[in-house]
Amino acid sequence: MSFFLRLAIFALSLFTITAGPVAAQEPIRIGVLLPLTGPFAKNGLENWEAMQIARDMINERGGVNGRKIEYLQGDATNPNAAISETERLITREGIKITTGSFASPLAIAVSQAAERNGVFHWETTGAAEIITRRGFKHTFQVGAPARKYGQAAVDFVVEDLAKRLKKPVADLKIALLWENRAFGKSVGDGIRAYVETKKIKLVYDEGYDQFATDMTPIVQKLKDAAPDVLIAISFPNDAILFQRKAKELNLNVAAFVGVSAGYSSPDLRTSIGDMVNGIFVADFPPKVNPNVLKPETRKVADEFYKRYEAKLQRPPAGHAAAGFSAIWALFTEVLPKAKTFQPDELREIALKLDLPEGSLVNGSGIKFTNFDWADDTKDAGQNLRASIGVWQWTKQGNEQVFPPKLATHEAIDVPMPDWNKR
């Protein structure tokens, strides 16, 4: 064998040795669309921290079938920005999988852009019903739809608060206040329909602009209605504004149930201090009774909460725990089964998932609709096993109080003390 032939074979062997592992190490790139600046940034950044922890945990375990996860960020500050950022990641970066988006208006926009470009979208926490009712084939809503938030709030009033307030449900005066954009309207519509099935009449039912700067007229109307229980759907800034005005004008209720978004934000305590104590929140569970989790899920949950609290010096809100739960399911239940990572393949994998409740860190399971759900045959990609319950702000932090199987603590401060006694 000639010298040059031996040299060529040696060079080829080096190429084979080095090229194989490099190709195997190619990362799985995922576009993460969240509000990192603007009015939703506080909650968006919470989700980002949770999703980074999930990425780090899976990469430390060797990634997905030996491939590391790599995130590319898109700043979805509003629906228009959400669309443009999604399209930028798809057209310029070649992203084939997107996730996010925290808020319903952003989730609607991101999933629309992803579907139009033939990209698989794994929605973590957006809740508006319309997300899965547009005939899309590649959008999967892992978190609970909006109606479940409202149903949890109403079920809590009927099954728990009525007994604590020592009143028949029919005698309870219940008020509904909702921000009039995608999430608030969707939850409000669901509550309105659900209370009818429970033979409950609302003494107050009004929407408002979440960017309103004066809550005085609304608080005055609520004082006139004098509800026992107020169910409010708000985002962070308007929730803060409402609570301050309620204290100023001395609006007292026996129980206050906020629905997700503004009332679930950890910054609510920072903004209004001990005024937050006693407020109930219908939302993703921030932490559930560990006995409902599968043993392997419990270990993942322990690691997530330990890392999150070490990094942010406080427990996660429910939406952050939901963001972690959803993306961890993508990493462990969907991507490991993929070969081509094409949207149609990922769709088929997702539709075959049949995970019981307790499979995810926040107590959820996964079973998606596929234009085959008896309640709505136009629905596809909605998770029918997403957990929603009610937790309560306490002096120590937050505690899950409903439903009983998820609860970590009994409800306290019912009826809620008047402002002058808090």
Image (tube, rainbow, N blue to C red):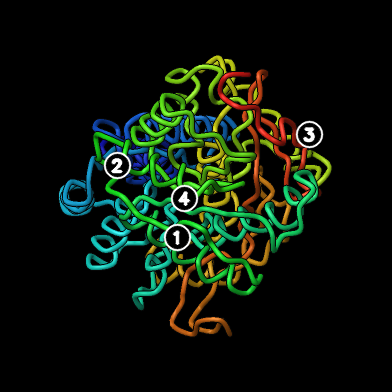
Q: Name the amino acid, label 4.
A: Thr
Indicate the amino acid at tag 3. His
Q: In this figure, which residue is indicated by the disc labeled 1?
A: 188
Looking at the rendered image, the disc whose residue lies closer to the viewer, 2 or 4, is 4
Extreme front residue here?
A: 224
Q: Where is mark 2, residue-wise?
A: 5
Residue identifier under label 3: 409
Q: What residue type is labelled 2?
A: Leu
Looking at marks 3 and 4 on the same chain, the residue that comes earlier in the sequence is marked by 4
Tag 1: amino acid = Gly
Q: Is residue 211 left or right of residue 344?
A: left
Q: How far is the residue under mark 3 from the one under mark 4?
A: 26 Å
Image quarter in which the C terminus is found: top right
Q: Where is residue 127 in the image (x, y as percent from the top left)?
A: 45, 56
Horizontal and vertical percent for residue 6? 34, 38
Say which quarter of the image contains residue 21: top left
Q: Identify the element where label 1 is drawn.
A: helix
| Disc 3 element | loop
Using the image, determine if residue 168 lies above or below residue 66.
below
Few, some or many residues within 10 Å of mark 4 (<14, 14–19, 20+): many
User: Disc 4 designates what residue?
Assistant: 124
Residues 200 and 268: in front is: 200
**Marks 1 and 3 close (CB-CB < 8 Å):** no
Mark in front: 3 vs 2: 3
